[in-house]
Image (spheres, rainbow, N blue to C red):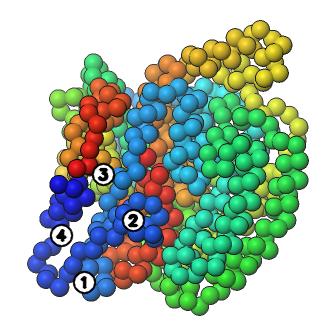
């Protein structure tokens, strides 16, 4: 397993900057996950990008924990640095009633399509996104296909006409 | 109303209606140079591209949803269908994510074979890219020579796994089976012939003056922009960023191989072309080293609850038969946890996010396809270029729609 000491140093720096930015830290399987409150995701991303060279957003994806869970949705940000090659995962937890989180397209442009995909398949809304439309499914599709309560074969056969 | 037409109207509202000299051209989804079913809404002023909006999703088949309903070992078959030019890389990344969650150690021979397969597949993928990219720009002959070489690689993959395009040969805990007899000789034979074939492709394309004028100074993207837009792989290295996950986040023993990371600084279609042409030679070097390292040994990990037993064992040992039955009928549980596993696929960083809640099926599998992210930067590269150059830029991104739409 990879050594996570270097990654935990970034967590320490985040804590030193503002303790409210972190609600939980897990260190398992050589990967560090920092759970961030919804309100501070922009500040945390800006801090990590500008001060610690996490200049590439490798991936952004959502997950549904199931309709009975609260918070139900999670959004994972996989940060990568092209300089020191470290990876860090940020996680934001969202409730079903208010699945909104601020967009990070202002920090990494690549977040644009990732956020559209997450919105399309899971129904997580990214506030202030410049162009939040469906990307993979047709614009008149009903529901969000990757939610756990969405049946595998859909509610009814989909027709293009 | 037709959905495509409805989308067009949605997007027309995003465009600036004030300029009357402009027209909207819907390029694709059947356009032969869009490498599948990609549609581009091009807003043109004469032949100049003012705005390009990619429209994807025509091939969406809900693969990420399907993963949640399939056992871990059944998911491998789905990954073949994503980036169908690089199936062994897709197998590898999915399998490695599961192995990381299981904390499984893989035997040395299996690692070497995985590296050999991945690099052969990378050459095959780059050959398809070269052939189609050249064909798009009117250089027809390179296509035939590139596909002839690719056919030889597919024959090798078929000999080892039984499938040409859908090998599913990399399995959780190792490989489906050991290499067939005489495989090393066949790989060496291919390797002996390949440099000459690559030299010929070089004379056909690389030295061609028409090729230079079609590719140089086209589709520019600076290093900062490339990182901002999340480009990876040859597209990023073509913008002068020295990053290769095989060297920087090594996996399956890549750190022990000797190869060069190809970087070009021109930031255009020509630079991305040169990176891939050089990469084929580097992959050739890695395959040579891997073949030399092949020593007899097991190709499956010693984990009877996860890895299917050999047929021979099943006939002789009761417990092997029981394990086989349990793995096939019920699957195996993976401890709860989440991982993000990135590899350097032929098109860039192929990452898989896998989340397990302890059962035999994953809770969530997400693929970060390099084609998906690279395509999202297409508007930046193509705005301000000619329509004919958009074809060159799409070719230089080396996209596969099967992976973009999933």
Say which chain tag 2 marks.
Answer: B
Work out how far the residue at label 4 is from the one at label 3, CA to CA, in angstroms. 18 Å
Measure how far apart labels 4 and 2 are at the Cα level: 23 Å
User: Hey, which residue is sitting farthest front in the picture?
Assistant: A161
Q: Measuring 32% from the left and 28% from the top, which residue is drawn there?
A: A151
Q: Secondary structure at mark 1?
A: strand
Q: Residue furthest bottom?
A: B209
Q: Tell me, yes or no, whether dots 1 and 4 are on the same chain.
A: yes
Vertical placement of B121 versus B14: above or below? Answer: above
Image location of residue B169, percent across then percent down: 68, 40
User: Where is residue B387 drawn, in percent x and y?
Assistant: 36, 80
Q: Position of residue B44 (x, y in %)?
A: 26, 79
**On screen, A87 above or below B312?**
below
Classify the position of the N terminus of chain B by image quarter: bottom left
Q: What's the residue at 82%, 31% (across, down)?
A: B298
Q: CA distance from mark 3 to mark 1?
A: 26 Å
Of the numbered discs 1 and 4, the one sitting upstream in the chain is: 4
Nearer the camera: disc 4 or disc 2: 2
Characterize the local packing of mark 2: few (<14), some (14-19) or many (20 or more) Cα atoms within 10 angstroms: few
The disc placed on residue A135 is 3
Q: Tell which subunit mark 3 falls on.
A: A
From the image, tell me which residue sits under label 1: B45
In the picture shown, does residue B261 fall above or below A134? below
Residue B14 picture quarter: bottom left
In the image, residue B352 lies at what x, y percent? 50, 41
Q: Which mark is residue B30?
A: 2
Q: Disc 4, disc 3: CB below 8 Å?
A: no
Disc 4 secondary structure class: loop
Helix, strand or loop under label 3: loop
Mark 4 lies on residue = B15
């Amino acid at each position: 397993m990879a050594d996570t000491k270097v990654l935990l140093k970034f967590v320490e720096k985040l804590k030193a900057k503002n303790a409210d930015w972190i609600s939980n830290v897990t260190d398992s399987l050589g990967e560090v996950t920092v759970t961030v409150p919804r309100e501070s995701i922009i500040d945390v991303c800006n801090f990590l990008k500008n001060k610690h060279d996490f200049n590439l957003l490798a991936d952004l994806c959502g997950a549904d924990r199931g309709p009975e869970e609260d918070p139900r949705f999670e959004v994972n940000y996989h940060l990568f640095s092209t300089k020191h090659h470290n990876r860090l995962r940020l996680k934001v937890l969202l409730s079903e009633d208010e699945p909104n989180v601020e967009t990070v397209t202002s920090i990494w442009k690549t977040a644009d399509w990732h956020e559209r995909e997450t919105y399309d398949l899971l129904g997580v809304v990214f506030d202030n996104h410049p162009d939040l439309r469906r990307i993979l499914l047709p614009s008149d599709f009903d529901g969000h296909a990757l939610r756990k309560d969405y049946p595998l074969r859909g509610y009814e056969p989909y027709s293009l006409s | 109303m037709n959905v495509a037409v409805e989308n067009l109207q949605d997007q027309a509202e995003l465009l600036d209606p004030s300029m009357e000299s402009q027209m909207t051209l819907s390029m694709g989804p059947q356009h032969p140079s869009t490498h599948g079913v990609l549609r581009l809404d091009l807003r043109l002023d004469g032949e100049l591209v003012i705005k390009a909006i990619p429209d994807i999703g025509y091939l969406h088949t809900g693969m990420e949803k399907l993963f949640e309903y399939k056992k871990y070992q059944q998911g491998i078959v789905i990954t073949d269908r994503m980036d169908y030019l690089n199936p062994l890389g897709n197998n590898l990344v999915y399998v490695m994510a599961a192995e990381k969650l299981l904390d499984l150690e893989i035997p040395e021979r299996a690692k070497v074979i995985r590296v050999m397969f991945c690099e052969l597949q990378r050459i095959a993928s780059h050959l398809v890219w070269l052939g189609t990219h050249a064909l798009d720009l009117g250089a027809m002959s390179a296509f035939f020579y590139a596909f002839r070489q690719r056919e030889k690689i597919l024959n090798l993959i078929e000999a080892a796994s039984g499938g040409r395009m859908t090998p599913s040969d990399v399995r959780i805990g190792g490989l489906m089976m050991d290499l067939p007899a005489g495989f090393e000789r066949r790989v060496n034979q291919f390797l002996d012939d390949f440099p000459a074939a690559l030299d010929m492709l070089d004379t056909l394309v690389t030295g061609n003056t028409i090729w230079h004028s079609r590719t140089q100074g086209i589709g520019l993207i600076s290093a900062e922009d490339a990182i901002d837009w999340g480009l990876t792989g040859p597209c990023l290295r073509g913008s002068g960023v020295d990053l290769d996950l095989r060297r920087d986040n090594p996996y399956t023993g890549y750190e022990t191989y000797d190869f060069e990371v190809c970087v070009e600084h021109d930031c255009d279609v020509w630079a991305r072309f040169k990176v891939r042409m050089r990469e084929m030679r580097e992959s050739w070097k890695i395959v040579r080293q891997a073949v030399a390292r092949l020593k007899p040994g097991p190709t499956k990990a010693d984990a009877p609850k996860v890895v299917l037993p050999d047929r021979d064992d099943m006939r002789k040992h009761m417990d092997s038969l029981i394990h086989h039955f349990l793995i096939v009928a019920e699957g195996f549980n993976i401890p709860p946890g989440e991982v993000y596993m990135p590899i350097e696929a032929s098109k860039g960083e192929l990452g898989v996010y896998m989340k397990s809640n302890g059962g035999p099926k994953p809770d969530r599998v997400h693929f970060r396809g390099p084609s998906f992210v690279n395509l999202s930067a297409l508007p930046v590269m193509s705005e301000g270029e000619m329509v004919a150059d958009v074809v060159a830029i799409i070719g230089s991104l080396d996209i596969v729609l099967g992976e973009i739409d999933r």
